[in-house]
Image: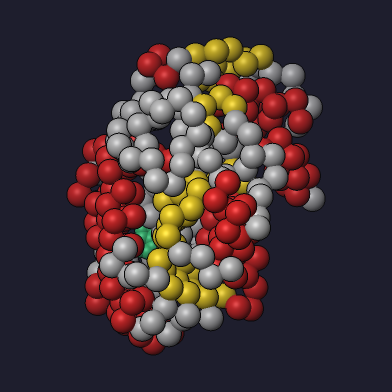
Amino acid sequence: MILVVGAKGMLGQDLMTLLGTEARGVDIEDIDITSMESVQKVLVTLKPRVVINAAAYTDVDGCESNQELAMQVNGEGVAHLALISKEIGAKLVQISTDYVFDGGKGSPYLEDDPPRPLSVYGESKLAGEMNACFNPDHLIVRTQWLYGLHGKNFVETMLRLAAEKKELSVVDDQIGSPTWTVDLSLAIKALIDKGCCGTYHAANGGFCSWNEFARVIFAEAGMGITVNPMSTAELGRPAPRPLYSTLDCGKLNRDAGFQPQPWQEALKNYLNLRRQ
Ligand SMILES: NC(=O)c1ccc[n+]([C@@H]2O[C@H](COP(=O)([O-])OP(=O)(O)OC[C@H]3O[C@@H](n4cnc5c(N)ncnc54)[C@H](OP(=O)(O)O)[C@@H]3O)[C@@H](O)[C@H]2O)c1
């Protein structure tokens, strides 16, 4: 059995659908990953062969003012999962982020490029990556710019704003790969099925700015909204973001034989599914 921790989150729900009867899901009502006792009780009782940790404190700006909570959930929580999964002989799959990088490389990041987080969220997720290594049988899957049917995300925010406004300003100086949680779930399953270990990057193919992403969302949705450019500095969010954090996913393709579809195709498929 595969145990999905954070099963009610945006990624967690798509993982549960994909894995079907093979999966069992738990979330904050069943397990608090910040407590070693709670993690031990659940893992020792359920004895999964794989634990996928999709639980996290994901409010990037909120982490700046709640550093302690960010480290407890995203850092120490992973240590608890790693130690107990090791004890029961299970593999740990830890979901991580492009925000472990500073965005200054100027070309797609490889798995072994040195991390240098800019934000508290990035620091806490990097601590989680290091703590995942307490279980030698671990997979760290870094991803970025997620959207899906079951959570707050950029696509849903744009579609909501478009219903209220005729014109929007969206940042055009952050570059990344929008990634559908269904495609990320398929990548995670492929890595598990092939018995892969270590660190992998998984994102939809190609890249764009948030501004271009917004334009394509409106074009695909048939909405005539004017999208103006805006800089990250002008937006003035509390947490600094990497400006160029595209992830090179070649290792995922080589080792697991899986290549996520281009982001434009994924978006079309998502919007079609959303209309049903
Ligand atoms: N969203 C993105 O753009 C993005 C980008 C890169 C990487 N990631 C990573 O991808 C993974 C999934 O992200 P997501 O957006 O699907 O997350 P999400 O929707 O925020 O779901 C996270 C889940 O974890 C639960 N949780 C929080 N604290 C917990 C605790 N102490 N113990 C147990 N469960 C807890 C949350 O419950 P509550 O809702 O009740 O707090 C929520 O159900 C995370 O590791 C995230 O860091 C996300």
Q: Position of residue 158 (x, y in %)?
A: 60, 30
Q: Residue at x 43, y 85 (%)?
A: 47
Vertical placement of residue 7 versus 106, above or below: below
Q: Residue furthest front?
A: 254
Q: Nearer the viewer, residue 130 or 224?
A: 130
Q: Residue at x 28, y 43 (%)?
A: 123
Vertical placement of residue 225 versus 86, above or below: above
Vertical placement of residue 13 versus 247, above or below: below
What color scheme is it?
secondary structure
Q: Quadrant of ligand 1?
A: bottom left
Q: Position of residue 49 (x, y in %)?
A: 47, 80
Q: Nearer the viewer, residue 123 or 211?
A: 123
In this image, 97 relative to 192: left or right?
A: left
Instruction: State whether residue 24 appears in this view.
Output: no
> Based on the displayed image, in which of its 4 quarters is residue 23 positioned?
bottom right
* Total count of labels: 0
Instruction: State whether residue 248 appears in this view.
Output: yes
Q: Residue at x 36, y 20 (%)?
A: 236
In this image, 117 relative to 269: left or right?
A: left
Vertical placement of residue 199 versus 60, above or below: below
Q: Position of residue 275 (x, y in %)?
A: 77, 45
Q: Position of residue 265 (x, y in %)?
A: 74, 40
In this image, 48 relative to 249: left or right?
A: left
Q: Residue at x 62, y 43 (%)?
A: 204
